[in-house]
Image (tube, helix red, strand yellow):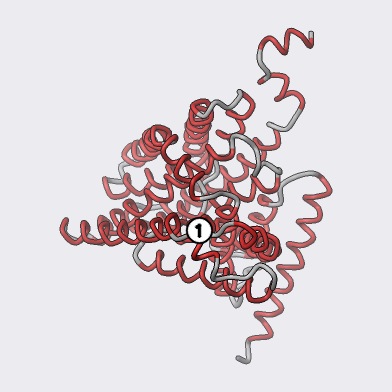
Amino acid sequence: MNDSFIVLIEVGALLFAMGLLGRLAARIGFSPIPLYLIAGLAFGTGGVLPMDASASFFEIGAEIGVILLLALLGLEYSAEELLHGLRRSKAAGILDALLNALPGAAFALILGWGPAAAVAVAGITWVTSSGVTAKLLRDLGRISNRETPSVLSVLVIEDLAMAFYLPLVSAMVIGVSLAQGAVRVAVAVAVVLVILFVALRFGPFVSRLFTPEHAEPLVLGVLGLTMLIAGLAEEVNVSAAVGAFLVGIALSGRVAESAREVLTPLRDLFAAVFFVFFGLATDASQLMQVILPGAILAAVTMATKILTGYIAARRAGIGVPGRWRAGIALTPRGEFSIVIAGIAAGTAPMLAPLAAMYVFMTVIGATLLARVSDTAWFRRVTAPKVARLAVR
C-alpha cells in the first residue's frame, strides 16, 4: 500500500506519454501502434527506464483491451452474418492453416528445436492478432469495407481453432498422456460450442437483459457479461477473444448500437494499454540476437498471410484492391503468438525472444503496408487493366 504512489506515478507518466504519441501519430497520419510498442520497450525489461511497480496494472489492462477490441468488433455483425461468413470461408481457413503453420514448423525443425517447439512455432506463425487487426481496421476506417467480412471470417476460424490448439500445445509441453490431452481438447471445444449456441440461438433474449436508454447500467452489464464469458473461456484454454467476440455477436438492435457508442472510449484506452504492455513484457536486451531469423520468418509468413487474405477475398467476389487490403490486414501476429511462446518457452532456447521479435516485425510491417494500400500509386497499380488503359 505504501508503494501505491509509485504505481500511480508510473501509470500516469506512461499514459501521458502515450497520449502525446497518439497525438503525434494523428498529426503525421500514421497508426500509433508502433509508437506504443516502442514506448513499452523503452520502459520494460532491458529498456532505458524499466517500470516494475505498474506491471500488473498493464497486464490486466492489456487483457481487457483485447476483450473490448473483439467484443466491439462482434457488435458490428449479426449471428446470421457470422454463420454465412464461416460457411463461405471454410476452404480459406484450411488454406490459411497450411500456408502459415507449415513454414513455422519447418523453421523450428531447421533450427533443430524438436517436435514440441515445431508445433509451437507453427501456431505462432499461423494465428493473426485479432486485436491488432481490429484496431487497424478501425483506425483506417475499413470496418464497413466489403472485404472486411472475409477478414473477420478467417480471424474467427483461427480463434475457434485455438480451442483445439492451445490444449494440445499445453499437453505436449507438460508431457501428459494422450487421454489427458484428449480430455483437455474435448472440454475446450464443448465450451466454445455452448457459447456459440447461446450467441446464435438466444441472441435476442440476451439483448433484452440490457436497456439502451441508460448508459451506466448498459456499460456495467455489457462489460461485465463480456469479461465473465471471456474469463470462463480462458479457464478451459479457450481464447478469451473468442468469448468476447461471440458476446458481441449475440447483442443486436439498439442495444448493440448504444453499447458501441458508450464502450468505444474504454476500448480505445485499453487497446492502447495492450500494445504498450507487449513492449513492457519484452526483454529488449535479447532482441538483437534474433533480428535475422525473426526477419526471415516474418517476411515469409507475411507473404503467405497476404496470399491467404487475397484468396479469401477473391472467393467472396471482392475486387483486386480489396483482396490486397484483406491480405495485409491478416499479416500482424500478436496476443496468441505471445501466449503460445509463453507456454512453450522451455522447449527451445531463444524461442520467446524470437516470438517477440517476430511479432514486432509483423505488427510494424502490417501498419506500414496498410498505409501503402491507401496511396494513389497502389490504387493505380491494382486497378483493373481496362481502367488503367482508360486513364492513359
Q: Nearer the viewer, residue 12 or 350?
A: 12
Residue 111 picture quarter: top left
Q: Is residue 117 left or right of residue 140?
A: left
SS class, disc 1? helix
The residue that appears at 27% across and 46% down in the rendered structure is 114
Report the residue at 32% width, 44% height from top: 118
Q: Nearer the viewer, residue 281 or 74?
A: 74
- Residue farthest to the right, as pictured: 27
Is the residue 376 above or below the residue 334 in the image? above
Q: Position of residue 27 (x, y in %)?
A: 84, 48
Residue 193, percent from left and from top: 35, 56
- Residue at 61% over, 39% down: 365
- How far across and down, in percent of the image, does residue 49 sit? 66, 67
Q: How many marks?
A: 1
Residue indicated by mark 1? 250
> Who is closer to the viewer here, 92 or 290?
92
Residue 225 drawn at (x, y percent): 51, 70
- Asked whether the viewer can see residue 41, the reply is no
- The amino acid marked with disc number 1 is Ala
What residue is shown at x 59% (from left), y 39% (from top)? Answer: 148
Q: Is residue 307 left or right of residue 184?
A: right
The quarter of the image holding the N terminus is: bottom right
Question: Splitting the image into 4 quarters, where does residue 342 fall?
Answer: bottom left
Left or right: 234 with respect to 146? left
Instruction: Please indicate, yes or no, whether residue 382 appears anywhere in the rendered image.
Output: yes
Mark 1: few, some, or many residues within 10 Å (few <14, many ≥20)? many
